[in-house]
Image: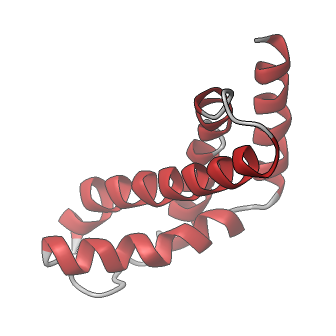
Amino acid sequence: MISTLAGAAFSLVGVFLGLGLPGALVTVPAVEIARLFLRVPPMGFPRDSAWPFMIYVTLLWGGAVPVCWLATRRWQGWRRALAFLLGFALLGVAIATALYVTAIAPML
């Protein structure tokens, strides 16, 4: 448990240093999902809100590391790595979609 928490702490620091770039990677599919299923305008952001939104998504996405790590603990080797990456990507898109639908889309 301690190693998981330490890994999450280092992950959050590393993700913060990315200054929103990981958040930008998951925001694009998240906005497309919101547009397809919820009829949100295409890739719209109010003035000067896109980059802070992506930084916030990046910071929240770091919390998915311990969740994915604990969820894949029964697998070993490449299966665990693949399941971890897939779960991490899906959680990132889910976080970005939820934030976009609740925080940005109502302002458009």
Q: Is residue 54 visible?
A: yes
Q: Quadrant of residue 17?
A: bottom right
Name the spot of residue 81 as percent of width and height, x first.
75, 49
What residue do we see at 56% from left, 63% from top?
54
Q: Quadrant of residue 40?
A: bottom left
Frontmost residue, 56 versus 11: 11
Residue situated in front as seen by the camera: 75 or 98:
75
Q: Residue furthest bottom?
A: 42
- Say above or below: 67 vs 106: above
Viewport quadrant of the C terminus = bottom left
Residue 48 visible somewhere in the drawing: no
Instruction: Say if 22 sits above or below 58 in the image.
Output: below
Residue drawn 69% across the image and 55% down it:
82
Count every numbered label the image shows and give the total: 0
Q: Give the x, y percent position of residue 4.
A: 77, 22
Judge from the rendering whether residue 26 lies leftward or rightward of residue 79; answer left or right.
left
Most distant residue in the left direction: 39
Question: What's the coloring here?
Answer: secondary structure
Question: Which residue is rendered at x = 53% and y = 55% of the image?
Answer: 92
Please identify the quarter of the rendering in which residue 66 is found.
top right
In this view, the residue in front, 102 or 94, is: 94
Q: Position of residue 35 (x, y in %)?
A: 24, 79
Q: Residue furthest top?
A: 2
Q: At 56% from the left edge and 43% from the top edge, which residue is drawn?
A: 60
Q: With 97 as the anchor, is 69 left or right in this view?
A: right
Q: Which quadrant, please, contains the N terminus?
A: top right
Please state if 89 lies on the left or on the right of 32 as rendered.
Answer: right
Say if 1 sits above or below 82 in the image: above
